[in-house]
Image (cartoon, helix red, strand yellow):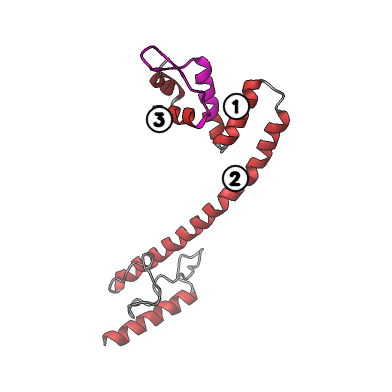
Amino acid sequence: MHIGELASRAAMTVDTIRFYEKSGSLPKARRSTGHFRVYGPLDLERVRFIRQMQAPGFSLREIGELVDLRDRKTEAGEVVRKLLHEKPATTRAKARPLQLLESELLADLRKCDLELRHRRNHRPCPCPVLKVGRNKNRDPLCSGLGETHPRSSWTGQLSRPARVWRRDCTRQANKLIF
């Protein structure tokens, strides 16, 4: 079969097959008289195995080790066990930065929600998420916006510090307007 058929049967792109060849995960294909790549059923099985091992997060280097063990038909229990044993710790290490990113995104979302609520009764202020410097060129009418103040989680009402903050912001704005 040619590269397009292999890619189709393996549910991946031709570029992916070429990448696997360049990285050494897939051996170089035989060439036909017309210089087309020619693959066999073992190549299809190998490509499917590579894809299957990528799903739980194995790197191409690790997959290469597994493929070598698989091709040599050696007793690979200890090596495979070691790779599987290391994978949860690696996964947790990758998850921590994503959890931090999620908390930052949620904090920014709260800032946006606060600004949008502020805009209902006041003039719009610059987006608190897109502000470059907190103290530089601060609009006095908008100072404090974007600072997170917790809402009471069960009532949906602004917490006392947030109400005081809102009152103080309103007073500051009224002093500047009147």
Provide the residue designation for mark 3.
Answer: 15
The residue nearer to you, when weighing 66 against 174, is 66
- Please report the residue visible at 59 percent of the width from the left and 45 percent of the height from the top: 91
**Label 3 to label 1: alpha-carbon separation:** 20 Å
Question: Which residue is at the far top?
Answer: 33
The residue nearer to you, when weighing 116 against 66, is 66
- Please report the residue visible at 29 percent of the width from the left and 86 percent of the height from the top: 176
Quarter holding residue 122 = bottom left
Q: Which mark is residue 67?
A: 1
Taking 119 as reference, is 49 left or right? right
Which amino acid type is shown beneath numbered disc 1?
A: Val
The quadrant of the image that shows the C terminus is bottom left
Determine crowd level at label 3: few under 14, some 14-19, many 20+ residues with C-alpha closer than 10 A.
Answer: few
- Please report the residue visible at 30 percent of the width from the left and 73 percent of the height from the top: 121
Which amino acid type is shown beneath numbered disc 2?
A: Thr
Residue 36 lies, with reference to residue 81, above or below; the image says above
Provide the residue designation for mark 2.
Answer: 91
Which amino acid type is shown beneath numbered disc 3?
A: Asp
CB under 8 Å between callouts 3 and 2? no
Q: Check disc 3 and report its element: helix, strand or loop.
A: helix
Taking 81 as reference, is 164 left or right? left
Decide whether residue 39 is among the magenta residues. yes
Q: Which residues fall within the magenta stretch?
A: 23-50
